[in-house]
Image (cartoon, rainbow, N blue to C red):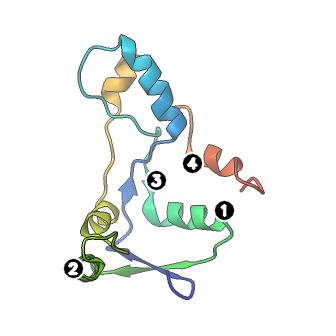
Amino acid sequence: MRAGTLFLPGPDVLLSLTAVENLADAALAAAGWTPGAYNVADADPYARDATVLRVLRAHGITARIRHLPPGLARTAARAAEALARGGEPLLSRYAVDQLAHSVVLDLTRARTQGWTPRHTLDHYLTTLPGGA
């Protein structure tokens, strides 16, 4: 983020996010579940751009989002990885991939076990100083 501008790859996408409280609730409940893989996330996906802006604002940061073509973002990530020379890059191709594509988890299997996500981003934001 430079000069109040945050560059994100591609257009806005939907993302499943998981409040740590939802994860903890599911982990505790899972002891009685049928063995297998379960998706755990907040009840509804979030629009990436609006969510990022809300979190930044809750931390006192004002920004505007500009969209970069995903190919350009990947090229920038490749360069950042090369410059890091094995260290932690400022931007990675993995991060670009995670932000550029919609990832919405199907919670059906966990819900059939009786689990319901109870926490949201709104809940988290109210725990911050100032109660965003």
For disc 2, the marked residue is 71
Q: Earlier in the sequence, mark 3 or mark 1?
A: 3
Mark 3 lies on a secondary structure that is strand
In this view, the residue farthest toward the top is 32
In this view, the residue farthest toward the front is 86
For disc 1, the marked residue is 58
Asked whether the beta carbons under mark 2 and mark 4 sit within 8 Å of each other, the answer is no
Between marks 4 and 3, how big is the CA–CA gap? 9 Å
Amino acid bearing label 1: Ala
Q: Earlier in the sequence, mark 2 or mark 4?
A: 2
Q: Which of these two is toward me, 111 or 71?
A: 71
Q: Residues within 10 Å of mark 2 (few under 14, many from 20)?
A: few
Please give the label number shown on residue 121. Answer: 4
Measured as percent of width and height from the top left, residue 65 is found at: 48, 78
Mark 2 lies on a secondary structure that is helix
Between marks 3 and 2, how big is the CA–CA gap? 24 Å
Q: Earlier in the sequence, mark 4 or mark 3?
A: 3
Asked whether the beta carbons under mark 4 and mark 3 sit within 8 Å of each other, the answer is yes
Residue 78 vertical placement versus 124 (above, below): below
For disc 3, the marked residue is 46
Between marks 2 and 1, how big is the CA–CA gap? 31 Å
Amino acid bearing label 4: Leu
Mark 4 lies on a secondary structure that is helix
Mark 3 against mark 2, which lies toward the viewer? Answer: 2
Q: Earlier in the sequence, mark 3 or mark 2?
A: 3
Mark 3 against mark 1, which lies toward the viewer? Answer: 1
Which residue occupies 24% across, 83% down?
A: 79
Amino acid bearing label 2: Gly
Q: Earlier in the sequence, mark 4 or mark 1?
A: 1
